[in-house]
Image (cartoon, rainbow, N blue to C red):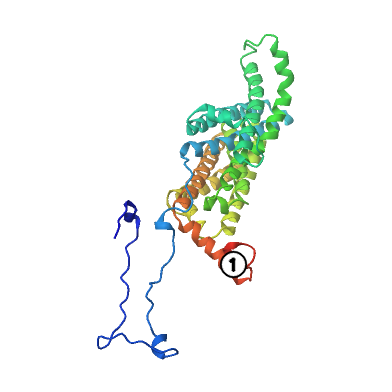
Amino acid sequence: MSTSTFDSYRPPEQARPRRERRGGNRRRAGRGGAEGNNEMSMVPDVEFTSYYGRPVVKPAPWGDDVAAYLFLGGVAGGSGLLAFGGQLTGLPTLRRNARLGALAAVVVGGAALVRDLGRPERFLNMLRTFKVTSPMSVGSWILSAFGTGIGVASAAEVDRMTGERLPLGPLRPLLRAVEGPAGVEAAVFAGPLAAYTAVLLSDTATPTWNAAKDELPFVFVSSAALAAGGLAMITTPVTQTGPARVLAVIGVAGDIIGVRTMERRMDPVVAEPLRQGRPGALLAWSERLTVLGGLGAAIGGRNRLVAVLSGGALLTASALTRFAFLHAGIASAKDPRYTIEPQKRRLAARQAAGVTDDAITTAS
C-alpha cells in the first residue's frame, strides 16, 4: 500500500462490520429471499463535513488593522455629515470639531489600511481604474474624494484657529471660497464612506458576512452615526451639541434594530459566531455600551460630564461592533460547518418545494 504525506490528514477509518458466517460457508439468499433483505451494510454511515476537515472558504487575511479602519471610516463619515449640519445651522464650534475629527479619523484609518496592505503604492494602484462591480475599487475612490473635501474644509478651520497665520499668501481667498463647497462635497461622500465597508465584507463568500448582506450596511451606518455623535459630545460644548445628540440617539436606535433584525433573518448556524467566543463577548459589550450611551445622550446630554461619558461609551461601542463582525466572519470561514450545513438545508428546502431544475445542485 502506497503512503503519502497527506495521509496524516485522513480521519481514522472505522472497522467494517463482518458478515456472519455459519458452518464456515457464506450463506447466499436467493432472489427475493428473506436473508438478502437482512444483510448488514458494508459501508458505515458518514456525516460529510469537508475535504479532510479543511476549510471550504479561505479566511480573509485581515487583522485588527482592518477592524480599526472599519471603525475609523465610520467615524469619519458620520463626522463629515455632522460637520455639514453644523455648517447649515450656524454652529461654528460643532462644525470645526466635526471637520477636524473626520480628518483625523481619515488619516489614522488610512494609515491602518496602508499598514495592512504592506506598501502604500498598493492603495494608489487601486486608483488606476474605477470598477463599479468592485466594492474595494469604489471604496478607494469614495475614501479619496471624502478625504479631499474634508481636508480642504479642515485647512480653512486650522487657518482660522491660528489667526490666519498659515503661509497661504494669495491662496487664502481661494481657500475661503472653496471651503463651503468642500464641506458639501465631504457630506455627499460621508454616507457612502460609512456604508461601503459593509458591502466590502458581505460581497465575499465568508458565511457570516454574506448571510448579513441585507442588514450589515444599515448596521454599519447606524454605528457610524452614534460614533460621530459620541465624538462630538466629547469635543464640543453642550450648548452646540444638540445635532450631535440627535444623531447619536438615531444611531443607537438604528444599531439595536439593525442587529436584532439581522440575527433574526440569518441562518441560526451562520449567526453562531456572532455570539460565541471573542466576537460574542465584543458584541455583547457593544450592545451594553450602546444602550448606556444612548440613554446618556437622550436624558443627560446637556450635562458636560454625562455628555463626555456617554460619548466615550458610544465610541467604544462602535469600535467593538466592527471588531466583533470582522472576527466573527473570519471564524465562520475557518469552520466548514458554517458553509456546509446552511447549504444542505437550503438544498433540502428547495427539493422539498419541488425545485429540481434550476441548478446542478438541486437536480436529483
As drawn, which residue projects farthest toward the left? 23
Vertical arrangement, residue 239 with respect to residue 281, above or below: above
Residue 91 versus residue 361 in the image, above or below: above
| Helix, strand or loop for disc 1 | loop
Observer-nearest residue: 171 or 54?
Answer: 54
Image position, residue 300 (x, y; %): 59, 41
Residue 227, above or below 218: above
Front residue of 139/286: it is 139
- Counting from the top left corner in percent of width and height, residue 236 is at 60, 30
Residue type marked 1 = Ala
State which quadrant residue 346 falls in: bottom right
Q: Position of residue 23 (x, y in %)?
A: 25, 88
Left or right relative to 109: residue 166: right
Residue shown at the point (32%, 73%) measured from the top left: 16
Residue 84 found in image quarter: top right
72 vs 48, nearest the viewer? 48
Front-most of 115 and 166? Answer: 115
Residue 300 visible in the displayed image: no
Q: Residue at x 32, y 56 (%)?
A: 7
> Dot 1 corresponds to which residue?
363
**Residue 333 appears at what percent x and percent y?**
47, 51
